[in-house]
Amino acid sequence: MSLLLAESFAERSARDRARALLDAQSFRELLDPFQRIASPYLEAQGVVPQSDDGTVVARGTIGGVRACVVATDGRFLGGSIGEIGGAKIAGALELARRDAERGTPTRLVLALDTGGIRLQEANLAILTVSEICDGIVALRELMPVVALIAGRVGVYGGLSLSTALCSQIIVSEGARVGLNGPDVVETESGIDEMDSSDRPLIWRVTGGQLRFRQGFATELVSDDVAVIRAAVERAFEEPRELGPLVPQPFPDPRLERDAFLRAMEIEP
Amino acid sequence: MIETLTYEFPANEGVRQRAHVGVVASGNCEILLEPAVDGRSAIVVRTSVSGFGGTWQAVLARFFARNPVAVQIEINDFGATPAVVSLRLEQALESAR
């Protein structure tokens, strides 16, 4: 589809992403910003909190079936998961499991866009990630658990572990999936290992396309609301198996540079 | 360090519903706007950039001079410029009317 005709998913806020995934007019937010359940730890550390703690939980329907979308906002503190945001996600998973056990399944979509746990709330945040992982493992026994990684940040850190536990993993070409982010790798292992300002390199080693080819995702989508909606619905109706892990050659920037120079008829 | 500022303005117009706009991200701010019951507006600003109380006063005074709406406003600011704050206030009001 033409870029001009596509309606971007990544450019939307977390709330609008949840609205876009749910059937029209069915969006109903739980613990909305006016409930003011923000992080109580940030202000003491000199960081301005956000009234929804960067995590949106919304009920509605997907394909006419009861659904719940959890969306994190990559713009607020890198989409980091603190105690409140983590508890919202873990709570949604718990309620979805109860619904499935009662025979009234709720389709749960984790639309994650996060750099991982929030360092200002480190221990509590790590605890919620373990609760989230528990919740995903319990729910995937009963029904597909869908992770949608289609934001500007992607998924890094603790939440990349949770993502890997989901039974259906949809990634976009613009998203990234990795454990340690590029800045962390550069700081810990040096600029020879990873130059965090080299955006093409970052996408070549952690980008959505590569992750799909490696077998870490069940579906690759473009940044288009209609395409993503269809992929999410399909993930529940015709869930896919993850393929075998396929090693991909690690791109060596020097070899690529040499090949480019040779193509330009310059001896490297 | 975070600075918390409070302001009050006389107001007489009502709004239909509450509104939430914006995001706490670099150069941006989040605004929660709710209808107020008494004929005045109360604003609480939490900002990561201290020392700009006079600028906030001027931006809010201009907004309420044009729109004397009785509302409670809470702003979580992450270094938004006066222009961005003014646009976010207008956006919140448009959603609430």
Image (tube, grey):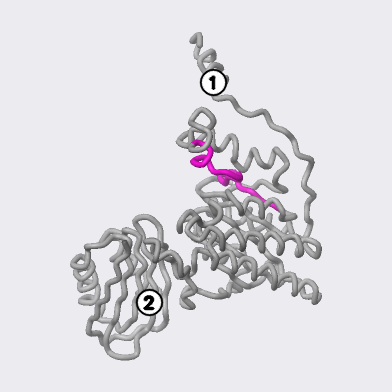
Q: Residues within 10 Å of mark 1 (few under 14, many from 20)?
A: few
Answer whether residue A105 is magenta in the image: no
Q: Quadrant of residue A128?
A: bottom right
Which residue ends up furthest to the bottom in the rendered image? B38
What residue would you read off at disc 1?
A254
Numbered disc 1: secondary structure: helix
Which residue ends up furthest to the front in the rendered image? A123
Residue at screen point 42% across, 79% down: B18
The Cα atoms of the two marked residues, 2 and 1, are separated by 54 Å
Q: Which residues are magenta?
A: A169-186
Q: Residues within 10 Å of mark 2 (few under 14, many from 20)?
A: many
Question: How many numbered discs, if any?
Answer: 2
Residue at screen point 19% across, 69% down: B58
Left or right of B62 in this view: A23: right
Is the residue A216 above or below the residue A97 in the image?
above
Residue at screen point 77% across, 75% down: A104
| Residue A6 rendering spot, x and y as whole percentages | 54, 51
